[in-house]
Image: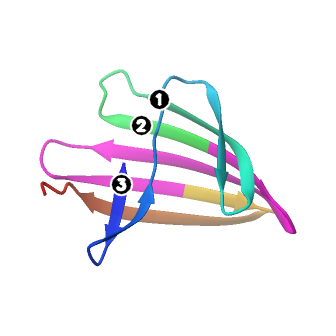
Amino acid sequence: MTTFADGKKVLEQSILADGSAHPVSESGCTGTQTSDWSRDGLRLFTRVEMSCSNRPKQTISGLTLFAKGPAWIDVQAMESEGDQQVRIRRFARSFD
């Protein structure tokens, strides 16, 4: 999955949705990511546990909802030291 902002690539991410924990590393942080598809293939469930130097451990749980058409919704819940945040994003496919 590639994310563009103002026509520039800002993030490229590979997701292996096999239900196993896979190592991840980003901006000095390391951890694991586990992703798995729903039975109907329209929802992707993801869990990331990251540790960063000088920062508390973070746990991020995500649900990506795919629908027929060019858009999908991504919901993420993040927890760090008891603080919780929720982020909801809407994406559109690019056909460049």
Check whether the beta carbons of the residues at disc 2 and disc 1 lie within 8 A of each other.
Answer: yes
Q: Main secondary structure of the magenta part?
A: strand
Q: Tell me residue 77's x, y (percent).
A: 57, 56
Along the polypeptide, which appears first: circle 3 or circle 1?
Answer: 3
Residue 14: in magenta span:
no
Q: Position of residue 5 (x, y in %)?
A: 33, 73
Q: Which residue is mark 3?
A: 2
Question: Residue under circle 1?
Answer: 17
Q: Residue at 61% of width from left, 67% of height from top?
A: 85
Amino acid type shown at disc 1: Ala
At numbered mark 2, what does the secondary structure look like: helix, strand or loop?
A: strand
Where on the picture, by quarter, is residue 44?
top left
- Image height check: is 79 above or below 47? below
Task: Please give left or right for residue 24 compared with residue 89 in the image.
Answer: right
| 9 w.r.t. 47: above or below | below
Residue drawn where x is 20% and y is 54% of the image: 93
**For this view, does 2 lie left or right of residue 30?**
left
> Which residue corresponds to the image point at 12% horizontal and 54% vertical from the top-left?
95
Question: Cα distance, mark 3 to mark 1?
Answer: 16 Å
Q: CA distance from mark 2 to mark 3?
A: 16 Å
Q: Secondary structure at mark 1?
A: loop
In the image, residue 70 lies at what x, y percent? 15, 52
Q: Which residue is mark 2?
A: 44
Residue type indicated by callout 3: Thr
User: Does the stretch in magenta take in 56?
Assistant: yes
Colour scheme in the image? rainbow
Placement of 63 over or under 4, stated as above or below: above
Q: Nearer the viewer, mark 2 or mark 1?
A: 1
